[in-house]
Amino acid sequence: MALDRPSVPNDLSAFWMPFTANRQFKKAPRMFVSAKDMHYRTADGREVLDGTAGLWCCNAGHSRPKIVEAIRAQAGELDYAPAFQMGHPKAFELANRLRDLAPDPMEHVFFTNSGSESVETALKIAIAYHRAKGEGQRTRLVGRERGYHGVNFGGISVGGIVNNRKFFGALLNGVDHLPHTHDLSRNAFSRGQPEHGAELADELERIAQLHGPETIAAVIVEPMAGSTGVLMPPKGYLQRLRDLCNRHGILLIFDEVITGFGRLGSSFAAEHFGVMPDLITCAKGLTNGVIPMGAVLCTSEIHDAFMHGPEHLIELFHGYTYSGNPIAAATGLATLETYAEEGLFQRAADLAGYWEDAVHSLRDCPHVIDLRNMGLIAGIELEPIAGAPTKRAFQAFLDCYERGVLIRTTGDIIALSPPLIIEKAHIDHLFSVLRDVLQNLD
Ligand code: PXG
Ligand code: PLP
């Protein structure tokens, strides 16, 4: 490798970093300067194994040739085209590919630029859909405690992560929350879906009866809750939500920003769990995290409800300057081709058993109060230090980083979600470093 490493800037003050302890970080910065396949390289020249696919997004690994080339070529051919009242071929092509990849009832695609925007878009489509059908009174939204649906106002309103909500005022009105499904007393150390908790879905019935079912537009949940610390849906839970939504004419939205594109060993979690929502939000893995892009997938039933009235009129007053951006679309196409050519979703499914055994091998480590896994995801929950929650897991993050492994923590939970190109030897290395780190933690 050439030794022309970019130098680290010595003034870090202007960049207000997202979801970061800015002052702490800037005293001891952790900088990545390049990446290839399973590894990052740090500013001080160390290799770091990517145990988190960036932020759950680089499912094909880093700097993959096909994706790099597609971006180069597209930038030289058509850099930007107006998104409203104009089109360009690759956005249509990518929409078709997504439709083919998604579970059958998903027929139409609306492009956004992030998971957060996908969530806002899906919530707005749900409310406008009911109105288009003559049910304008259906405006209420139901989310779930501990849900993460991005950081915009709609998303934090239906979301259930306290710190993401409490500083930001009154939020959307007309929102209720289902209880979360985390229950260590009954489900600790489950492999795959936990046995207990399907009945928590019945809370939707109580909410429906409280307000009148005919006032509720949509329920939004992550089929597997990632950001809050990897909570698997209890067996039967998602189907029960689906049944209640059907009974009351409520739309079901699966937020698949993390679970989409192979994370669980199938294209989408809807397929993995065999439960079909009415809308799916996605982002991240759609472009391998390389160029910002998200999408909302929906059924023809929803899309077609808008396709009435004079044809010269806009049917949905919504869209972004960068919806279907040419470089993002080209990146999406190259990403989906890479997944298909390398069979990466199947690879995740094939490795899931080996991964599961590796995760549960940590059972005897100190501080570990739960281990959970599915596909190529793991949650490792640590006993918090009394009076200092989050500190223990964050120390594990720092120690792993020093030892050349990138993990992610939320509260006192370690979340793992490696690129789907991971090899067994990487898995062995990841868990041996983790074991060592856990054994030496305070
Ligand atoms: N919905 C879900 C289910 C998500 O996981 C978003 C929406 C928002 O996507 P954008 O692209 O706007 O960030 C997400 C994003 C973490 C972590 O470490 C999780 C996310 C983002 C960053 C970090 O858990 N999830
Ligand atoms: N703010 C202003 C002043 C704008 O003109 C626009 C778009 O034209 C936006 C916000 C929205 O930007 P975007 O379409 O990138 O979400």
Image (cartoon, rainbow, N blue to C red):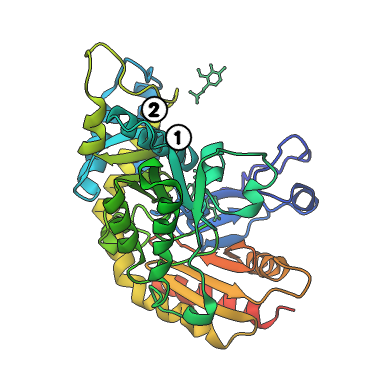
Q: Residue at x 30, y 21 (%)?
A: 315
In the rendered view, would you say 272 is above or below 299? below
> Relative to residue 79, is residue 94 drawn left or right?
left
Q: Position of residue 299 (x, y in %)?
A: 24, 41
In the rendered view, would you say 110 is above or below 342? above
In the rendered view, would you say 440 is above or below 133? below
Q: Residue at x 64, y 42 (%)?
A: 6
Q: Nearer the viewer, residue 209 or 428?
A: 209
The residue tagged 2 is 325
Q: Is residue 289 visible?
A: no
Q: Nearer the viewer, residue 71 or 232?
A: 232
Q: Residue at x 40, y 26 (%)?
A: 75
The residue tagged 1 is 113
Q: Nearer the viewer, residue 416 or 430?
A: 416
Within-10-Å neighbours for mark 1: few <14, some 14–19, many 20+: many
Residue type, label 1: Asn
Q: Position of residue 272 (x, y in %)?
A: 28, 62
Task: Kindly tell me whether mark 1's CB lies below 8 Å from ligand 2.
Answer: yes
| Alpha carbon distance from label 1 to label 2 | 9 Å
